[in-house]
Amino acid sequence: MLSATPYKIPLEVVDIKQKSTGQTAKKDAKPEYKLGIYVGLGGNANPRLYEFDTGGEGFWAAADSKSPKDLRWWGAKKIVSRGSLGITYSSGNRYVANKVRTSVELYQPDADGGFSKVVGTGQPVDMGQIVRYSDAKSKSAVVNWNNALKRGSPPLQNWFYGDFGASLSPNGTSEKNSILSIVPQIPIPAGLTIGFIVHVGDLEEGGNQPYLQIGLTPEDLKSFDTTLPMNPYTGTAQRFFPITGVDTYSERIANADFSWTDPKTNRTQSFKDLGWTIDTGASSVTVWQGDSVAVNRGFLNKPTRSGGLFTGRFKKGVDLNVTATASNPHETNINMTIDGGSKKSADDKIAANYHTTTAMGQNYVNTGLYTFTQYDVMYNLEDGTIHFRSSQPPTQN
């Protein structure tokens, strides 16, 4: 008996160092890749591109009330509460949003320039409608955001209309002031396991189509090489996703061991059993320090002191190693090296940083989009496990 068919939604690869018109912002700018997904709101048949962000909590879409009427992207919605939602990203972006209830549909582009709906929530879900944007690191970004909305063009990095978070952790501290990611709320056909797969692969070679697959077949469950348990969500907001009823999980999705070595001095630092975030929305790799993780200044290029810790870019040539032992003894362990000597793109930039508030998290490592260039990642939401298989083609002998 054939299993039901999962939903497969293509992901768009964009270089945010280029304008959405395709013109290079700076002639010598190195690429900085992001992923986008086409989403329609409230039955609106004019989907827009949103950043696909496995490190982001909840779905946040810019309001269109200041945009030309013929370019608006919101359909039917109900405002649950005004200005009750907020989120701050490590990039400096901060959104204040209305909590709204609307249906959400995912689309694929057609060859003729149109779009075809792949799947939707089937009923209204809660999300954030961004009514105020700020950026602690860039005043010009706020001006650009507001001007883009007046034109009806994408306000986020000139490419996106908001952040389509796919983290399994709730945003906020209570059900009233929090929202959840959309993907785990999408119902799937009978015969499939609730979960999803993210495939990215090589971003620079071309010929590769990243995608999001919703729903897992029996064949999918057998095809991954490594299984790790996902860390449970321990906060005070929602514990279960609506519609499907599956559990929420920590943004530090699993645990791993981390180390870095300076080849010039042979000096190494290592930390065991740290939280591990894998985040398509992060172009760089960051060690987020705290009371139990402190990067020695000797590994950093031009280190600066912040909160009693040293922050900055890792020196060229300092590699970061990630290891994790598979749950099943017959499986392959995670052993990933992020090359500190390769600087042809921003994706493998490695840095040490520090959150000034514990609420944003400490003592973990975010290996960013780079992880997904090395591994396909499967999230099994029925048994609380995350799975990895190499996304790289086999080495030719």
Image (cartoon, grey):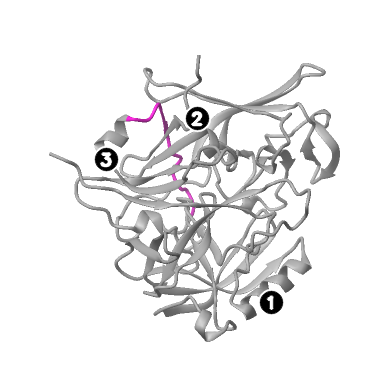
Mark with earlier residue (1, 2): 1
Residue 147 - label: 1
Kindly identify the amino acid type of the residue bearing the numbered disc 3: Thr
Residue 218 - label: none
In the rendered view, does 290 fall on the left or right side of 322?
Answer: right
Identify the residue under disc 3: 217
Magenta span includes 122: no
In the rendered view, does 26 fall on the left or right side of 235?
Answer: right
Magenta span includes 228: yes
In the rendered view, does 266 fall on the left or right side of 327?
Answer: right
- Residue closest to the far bottom: 69
Identify the residue under disc 2: 392
- Residue closest to the far front: 112
Report how far apart the C-alphas of labels 1 and 2 lie in the structure: 41 Å
Quarter location, residue 123 = bottom left
Kindly identify the amino acid type of the residue bearing the numbered disc 2: Gln
Q: Residue at x 81, y 42 (%)?
A: 308
Mark with earlier residue (3, 2): 3
Kindly identify the amino acid type of the residue bearing the numbered disc 1: Asn
Q: How many marks?
A: 3
Q: Pointer 1 and pointer 3: residues touching (CB < 8 Å)?
A: no
The part of the chain drawn in magenta is 223-235
Q: Is residue 172 visible?
A: no
Q: Residue at x 66, y 43 (%)?
A: 284
